Image (tube, rainbow, N blue to C red):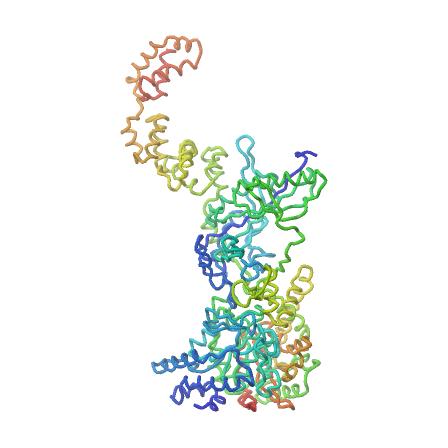
Amino acid sequence: MNRTDWETVIGLEIHAQLTTRSKIFSGASTAFGAEPNRQACAIDVALPGTLPVLNRGAVERAIRLGLAIEAEIAERSVFARKNYFYPDLPKGYQISQYELPVVKNGAITVQVGEGEAAYEKTVRITRAHLEEDAGKSLHEDFHGMTGIDLNRAGTPLLEIVSEPDMRSAEEAVAYARALHTLVRWIGVCDGNMQEGSFRIDANVSVRPKGETRLGTRREIKNLNSFRFLQQAIDYEVRWQIETLEEGGTVQQATVLFDPERGETRVMRTKEDAHDYRYFPDPDLLPLVIDRAWIEEVRSNLPELPQALRRRLVEAHGLTPYDANLLTASKELADYYLAAVAAAGQALAKPCANWILGELAAKLNRSGIEIGESPVLPAHIAALVRRVQDGTISHAGAKKVFEALWTGEGQDVDAIIEAQGLEQVSDESALESLVDAAIAANPKSVEEFRAGKEKALNALVGQVMKASRGAANPQRVTELLRRKLTG
Amino acid sequence: MSAERLLTSSLRELAAALAEGRTRAEALADAALERAQALQERLNAFITLTPEAARAAARAADERRRAGNVSLLSGIPLAHKDLFCTRGVRTTAASRMLAEFVPPYDAFVVERLADAGAVSIGKTNLDEFAMGSANEHSHFGPCRNPWDTSRIAGGSSGGSAAAVAAGIVPVATGTDTGGSVRQPAAMCGVTGIKPSYGRVSRYGIIAYASSLDQAGVIARSAEDCALALTAIEGFDPRDSTSLDRPSEDHAAALAAADGQLDGLRLGLPREFFAAEGLDADVRSAVEAAARTYESLGARLVEVSLPRAELAIPAYYVIAPAEASSNLARYDGVRYGYRAPDYADLDDMYRKTRAQGFGDEVKRRILVGTYVLSHGYYDAYYLQAQKLRRLIAEDYRQAFDSCDLILAPTAPTTAWRLGEKGQDPVQEYLQDIYTIGANLAGLPALSHPCGFDSAGLPIGCQLIGPYLAETRLLLAAHAFQGKTDWHRQLPPL
């Protein structure tokens, strides 16, 4: 068999760290980067006699995510203990939801690919459950010993588990990105992948095309960038296909991706899998969520990316591709919507073009976030309006944009005035320039009259040049055409 | 006030003596400490005595009294089972694992009693991590029964029961997971109450089996229990299983009672009195107690708890399961005992836990780990949980035809030290009458009702419907108004 005879099957488990200020079962801070063990209270250290108390903020965020993926919010869910010994697991068990998760049966629809090849894909989300994070083992700087930092112990996580619905690394990345956008959009997770706020485990298997049973999967643990996700899956799929084609078998295993070598390597096999001895945590009552709470959370949800995307295509006339780009983050979408609100919906398209073109390029090059952009949505609106009403040319608009970006000017009309960018549209002022161009370029005139439309552009160019760019090219074109055909 | 008076006075009498200036908190603390020290070698009721902290607290209580308003418990000496965390005072759970552990905080119960002005003189002995029915499984040696020091004090709260029986303190705290307040109270001839699950916060109690653990008090009378219990009840946001309802003033209810129990229906469970192993002296003393209740106006009715004998197997699956998880934190990594020599991490875990825990604790961790394991969970843990619900249902039905259940607290009186050490099941069977209340989350108390032919105290147990603590205490208080079993003193 060759590669095209195999089908890849991927499911993702994503750990999103929730944005609560305190931990899921204690009052200690969740802020990142403190001195080791400075944010670990008696509960986090698991001193004898301490008890967990559930942080309602974490539950509220789980509900928010559940609503955003159109899932069921469980009226009653249960925290269980997952028992295993590890030095950075202070209680000897992790509190996590097992049999009854707080969120189940959701889905999101994501855009995969670009341009012609782009398509929509719906990924089902089996469940999302609340749990606490473990601490960290520090193997460096301790001369053969291991240091333990419990600052992270008890940090609230939402583990979001998809169905094995993805069929390629591209789909997996598109889904992970969409979820990453979504959790930040609704404010439940800061999405900071370097700090581990959004960690991805990928379950990957392959099977012959047409086969309905799943192949044996291997789980790639702890991927902390979309690039690694793509690379790790690509490698893993290749490896599994090669192994099977060479007559080997894939053993169920947990693997780690080594970005330097671009390979996955086995961390543990099924044989040394733990028996976690899950059972309901008797220290915590079942989590009961009433309808009123769900409705309250729902009423505070912003318009979600998928709904907004639909609106941008249907009401604003944008392409799905542009709509997708503009909804990559809440900040960008809000920026766009503010510009359109000021410019009028009829000018949505040029607003989008400016934001995704000139502005995105500038932000990208200088590494500035949209929230810190010196060019404001009101500027974009004023700019597209002045282009629309013919006051400035597109070239002039670029100069205005530049002045706004550098801070040279704050007001679009003032910049136009100061830089003399207003186009000459007055016919009497343009007529002499048009006449001069006709007189000086008989060849182009002849060609145009012979039916060569392009010759007109040369003449427009001459007029523009003579006006030092100040002439309104549209008016010049009209004037030329009238004179040459009249 | 002399140590003799301390030995025999009720809390109200002591409070009156303090209020009228006939004694001071410091004098009471001194007397309690003196007696504790004098009896320590014979009883081993204490793991830690805290004379300095006690005197400081007593002086503070005396000062507050001079300043004005104080509560009834202000200046009363007491002791805490060494399972309650005490800030700055080592809290061992009678285990080598925590022999040097000093908590940075007070348990809710400790905090409440300190706020009420009570003066703790130290920490009492217990079975390691509260696992036992004799107080023989203690890293610090067994606690002995004040009535016969060759015998067990009962467990796990043996030290608290012995300290009260010996007149060291008028009241002591305990915890009750399967009878650990009631059974030692019975063995030592004192009164002990285990409230409904959720009544008293578990915050700061070193966990044994979280769904069963409940704090209680041991004292010389139901009235004293009522006073102490009123002080430790109430909602605590730090314990998610704590009941969010105001505490009840049980003591006020007792003060208002007329000592009669007209119309009270007392249910005698047929299965309990038919159980194999029920000592004849215990049976006749409890039956006599029932007749005393009858003479107070109560009506005796026979009830049935058909699944009573399944309580022990259910308990000895659920409690070890929870314990195996609760005790996983004692791994030598952050605090507590760590083996001195080890090759690697796994070796450190193994040796630390092998050396740090005693046999009974290890036995329960092994059982608990087993019943939660893949492939056994359904057959043991889930099955035990089903039994637990059925047993709770039996109690609920029994309470359709009675107001309180009357039963023996334990099938026998105190046995000799070492007598059951070789056969853990024999010790487990001692819990047959007490475990049901824990599985069902019900309040229950034990009060003295006589002596066996060897002169050892016998306990009578009352079990009530959920949150019926006041009813329990009223009944026992009426009983104690008519009898003087609770006033008998051990021959020390």
Q: Residue furthest left?
A: A418
For the N terminus of chain B, the image quarter is bottom left
| Percent coordinates x, y for residue B314 in the rendering | 66, 70
Where residue A38 appears, as percent x and y from the top left, is 44, 59
| Residue B250 can be seen, yes or no | no
What residue appears at the point 58 percent right and 44 percent down from the top-left corner? Answer: A257
Q: Residue at (43%, 15%) from the top-left corner? A: A454
Question: Where is B185 relative to B100, above or below?
Answer: below
Q: Is residue A460 left or right of residue B327?
A: left
Residue nearer the viewer, B391 or B42: B42
Quarter of the image where the C terminus of chain B is located: bottom right
Q: Position of residue B300 (x, y in %)?
A: 62, 84
Residue B85, compared with residue B144, is above or below; it is: above
* Total numbered labels placed on residues in the image: 0
Outermost residue, right side: A247
Q: Quadrant of residue A248?
A: top right
Give x and y (percent) for residue B418: 65, 81
Classify A216 as above or below A424: below
Residue A87 visible to the viewer: yes
Q: Quadrant of residue B294?
A: bottom right
Q: Nearer the viewer, residue A477 or A252?
A: A252
Q: Viewer-proximal residue, A212 or A14?
A: A14
Q: Is residue A69 left or right of residue A352?
A: right
Tell whether A318 sits left or right of B464.
Answer: left
Residue B51 falls in image quadrant: bottom left
